[in-house]
Amino acid sequence: MVEKQIPYGLKITFLVHLIAGIIFGLGQLLIPEIMMGMIGFSIQEPTISMFRMVGAAVLGFTTSSWFAYKETLWDRVKIVVQAEIVWTILATLTMLWALIFVGLPTALWMNVVIMGAFAVAFTTFYYRT
């Protein structure tokens, strides 16, 4: 029985996710006031702490992408892809809801596009593999 290999495009998706996650995750975790100011958030507690927590979550998923990138077999990364699908879809929907109904800064549309793109990529590779 031949085991399925990880598609090249999925490996690239893991790598891009790793790079984006490091940039955004470290920024939110270590310099939340600067990141918040860049997108127009009011810089105050408890928002700063929540921003840090999201940064920690992003770095957690980023770490899983690094481990998955180093693998070669689909069965060893399938659960990571499943978790990424859930995370990216929920994050995209949550940000969309907040943009439409809460009136969060419009700069968050960039996050919606990025997370939505990852949701599409991970979902596509999951169903194709």
Image (tube, rainbow, N blue to C red):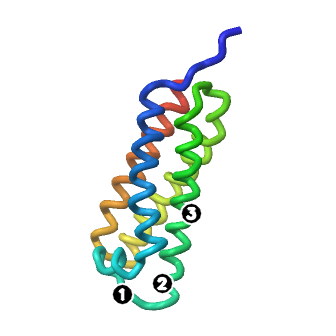
Q: CA distance from mark 2 to mark 1?
A: 8 Å
Q: Residue furthest top?
A: 1
Q: Residue at x 54, y 29 (%)?
A: 127
The reply to whether discs 3 and 2 touch (Cβ–Cβ < 8 Å) is no
3 or 2: tag closer to the N-terminus: 2
Q: Residue at x 47, y 32 (%)?
A: 10
**Which residue carries the number 2 mark?**
47
Mark 3 lies on a secondary structure that is: helix
Q: Residue at x 61, y 47 (%)?
A: 83
Local packing at callout 2 (Cα closer than 10 Å; few below 14, some 14-19, many 20+) is some
**Which residue carries the number 1 mark?**
42
* Residue in the foreground of this view, choosing between 7 and 120: 7
**Which residue carries the number 3 mark?**
57
3 or 1: tag closer to the N-terminus: 1
Specify the amino acid type for callout 1. Answer: Ser
Specify the amino acid type for callout 2. Answer: Thr
